[in-house]
Image (tube, rainbow, N blue to C red):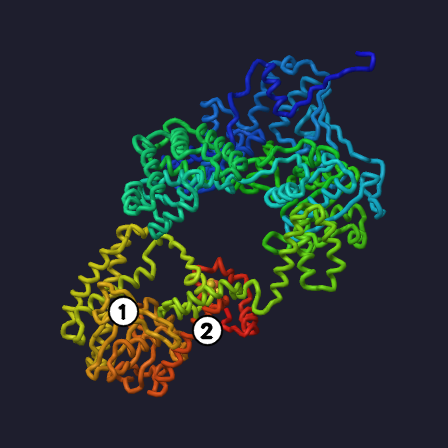
Amino acid sequence: MTESGAALVIPVYTLDQYAAAILRRAGGRPRSRPIGELEREIVIGRLLKERAGLGQLTALGRSADRPGVARAFAGAITEMTQAAASPEQVERTLTGGAAPAGVHADFLAVWRDYEDFLEAHGLSDGEDLYADAARALKAQGRQALGDPERVWFDQFFNVTPAEAALISAVARLVPATCVSLACTQCDDTDFVVERVRRLVEPAAVEVRVPGECGPTVAGTGASVSHSTLELSIMTAPGPAAEAREVAREVKRLIVEEGRRPWEICIASADSAEFIPALLEAFEEFGVACAAPRKRLLSSSMLVLDCVALADAAASRHSGFDLVRLLASPYIGRGPACAAQTARAIGVKGLKLTTGRWKARLRRTDECGDALALVETLAEAWSGNFGKSGGLADRAREFRGLLAAVGMPESIMAVDNRDWAVESWAAWRAFNSLLDEIARSAGDGEAGGDGGWAEFARILGSAIRRRSFPLERPDPAGVKVVGPARAAESEWPVLLLSGMAEGTFPRKMRRPWMFKEDDLERLARSGVGVMLPREHAAMERFIFNAAVGAAIDRLYITYPSSATDGSSVRRSFFVDELLDSMGISAEDERRITASISPRDVFPRRLGMAASPRELALCVLAFARAHGQAHEQAAQLMPEVREWSRQRPDLWEIASWWKDRSAQGQGPGFSVYSGAVGAPDLVDSLRTKMLLGAVWSAGHFDDYLRCPFAFFCSRVLQLGAVEEAPDEPTPLTRGGVLHDILRRFFERHLGSCLVPSKIDDYHSEMASIAREELDKVDIEAISMSGPAWEAYRSSIIAQAIRTLDAQVELACKTDGFWSPAHVEWSFGLAFRPDAAPSSVREYLILSGGLRVCGRVDRIDIGPDGALAIYDYKSGSSANLPKFNEIKEADEVQLGVYVLAVERLLASSSQPVAGAWYYSLRDNRMGSGVWREEYHDRFAAERRRGGKLSSEEWREYVDRVQASALDVAGKAAAGVFHIAPRKPSSCAWCNYRRVCQVYMLDLEALSQSAAGDGDTCTGGDCRG
Ligand code: SF4
């Protein structure tokens, strides 16, 4: 007692602290250490595996180690311990005294193994602390409690039986023990109060209804428990938009109404989408928040790189992707170095062992950093690495491996500074994950590679569930909690958010090993499991208790759609609340703000809540100014005023305005693909016309899609291919080309005859084997047997092609004999080129130079020449007769021009030019002179048959089309205009042109309007 009054110190504990204090006073100690969540799951996974290995799991069998089983068992065991149940009690209830069977037997066996493990290792599980404290009270009486006269347990309305056991034990020693509940009246209030009373007796239960005195919702005439409570409803399209609007309203309350952040609480049941989006919005809007902003470990590049290193260690004997590790700025040298290495070795995604990596990298000069990294890894993986021990040894080895590649020091490297703080936070959380995995190790666990594979799997799965904090919470900031926590206190302003059907009431999680009647039986026998109807009642109670926790203002917010755009209903609890308050539909409309998708970003400057939003607003206004001059006078002064404090924004806005004005100019749109800058057009003129050498294939590339041509031929953007699981069609086609070239080189000047077919077969097979031996199979992730099967298929295909050629020779009475194989013009000589090849270019009018290589040219007895171009695809995918004839595809036509001008004598006609499908072994499409129709056995194919006059017209058309293409490219015309949708299917530039976002039809029309339509004809996708 002092002069100014009484001084009292009332100790306040959480229930965990209180239980630990009891154990301390009782002279006992909490069991050495509580087991972690991940640790529990690993231990249970191992116990499952052991039992499965011994054949002791009757229902699960070998599926015991499937993903999710250990997690489900861990969840069910936790639920049983929260219900204060023992394995014996559960077994008695489920079996009625008989031997347990099926999945129940498996569950009970693993649960007992787990209890034994905890006992043997001195560990405790979540609820053990309460049970131990209750036991200590029973054994030692009041002395373990100190000397309290009264004990209050506040707001335990969803008390678990394990917690209740401790409260009951206290109440038996201190008669003035009570559990106080603050709640509002609802249909389920009595049920919840009765449940608490039953569980905690002999403790008394005090129920308090806050603000009982009066009844109106401001301005509506409706009533709730608080006299001046103001209710508002907000709905927005999707959880992210809802979160943004909630954050905007909170900022408004603080800035405009002078609310203190700590007076405001946001309660949401949607922790997956709403809360992360809300915390991001608070960060952007500069609102202090009492919850830490978190991010999943799997969203940290640093952590993903570490897991990639663990994966590499697990697959070090079969092959790992070194370039992936090299791309990491923490483990390797960063993306630029990785890209350089991938280009140097010509492929990415390659998986090799350290030995094979070293051999491959030593062949290439530019790979010094990659070689250094692989040598570091080889060194770290040598000796006894991964040879014995369990997860603890794997964790130790992994730490050594990380240190060898420079972690964690590399986090602070100069290049990583921008991300250092965030990466360091992720590293700390990842490190504690490694500690937990190491602690979970039991004795006698299997070692070797299985251990590393298991370790990498556990890491990969854990990082998708663990998060790391991005910044410290501000204790004086806005509270962000779940609905149950919100209901524990009173709040001047409360926002109940995420109130969508399926989110609140939350779905009840029932362990799949128990059916509903199992739960009923357990509940009837006194095991305190929660039944579905009880869960629903509890959720309704929590909702109403949370509503009752609001003092001045209550907001109910919900998303009107899901993230994928599907519509979502609001929680029926909201409807029940409005009904109970007597709010009419008209009143509801008045207090509801519906945010449309258009308004998620503010369109009025006064609504901007962050510099980013302000910038967006200013840009939008500047754009409007550029497009509508009559509005500018009204808008720009406002923009000017706002940008007075942010001159940088004004610069951006001016730039945007100029750009918008430029966009009004002819032929310009974001996606028009027209190069407009005069200096670039000048350089294109040189590059595409005067200094250019076109190949026949280049013309067709442009005709298929001018923009793809721009990327590949002008910008020369080349993607490094992924190492495929099997040879690509390109590799297959290349090998077949080489096989056929070598075969026909040996048969120049003589037509194929059926009588020699056996000799041809063995000759072809031996050439094919030799060519296949040259393939770089290291760059293909293919098993030995699969490669052998593939070899056989190529040899068989070459033989089939040969048979088809002999058959064709029969049909055409041996008219044609191969004369030139790989005949080139305008190209440097290669050893495999035909000796008749020429260095001269084909010169088109205006001096345009063209080069090319023809796969095969046959000659007839009259000197006529037939041109063949091999294609690896099926004949159905080849250009159509009409496309060739109309010069929408010009490759064959360019060959015709080249052969006529550079190879044939004046008396030698070119009889025809054909695409030959190696897949179907037939002549696909082409053009030919009508007098040679039968000589090509063209039979009913007539689409490419041309009279002499038509032939001349065709050749002229090809020339005109090629010149037109070159002219457009020189003028900078590169529309996104694929001639067929199929052109886009395998195009490497989809992500550059973003064709999937475009309305190609509209685009082709706009291109037509510019007078620059693509000559490819059908521009529609
Ligand atoms: S994806 Fe289609 S539109 Fe885009 S560049 Fe390739 S072919 Fe052209």
Q: Which residue is mark 2?
A: 1016
Residue 59 at least partly seen? no
Depth check, mark 2 against mark 1: the one in front is 1
Mark 1 neighbour density, 10 Å: few (under 14) some (14–19) many (20 or more): few
Q: Is mark 1 within 8 Å of ligand 1?
A: no
Instruction: Indicate yes or no: mark 2 CB to ligand 1 under 8 Å.
Output: no
Q: Residue at x 60, y 31 (%)?
A: 526
Left or right side of 362 for 109: right
The residue carrying mark 1 is 839
Q: How many residues crowd mark 2 within 10 Å: few (<14), some (14–19), many (20+)?
A: many
Residue 925 in percent (x, y) is at 34, 76
Quarter containing the N terminus:
top right
Q: Nearer the viewer, residue 571 or 179?
A: 571
- Mark 2 falls on what kind of element? loop
Amino acid type shown at disc 2: Gly
Spatial separation of the CA atoms under disc 2 and disc 1? 31 Å
Left or right position of 644 against 73: right
Q: Amino acid at mark 1?
A: Arg
Seen at 50% across and 66% down, the residue is 976
Where residue 72 sits: x, y (%)? 50, 39
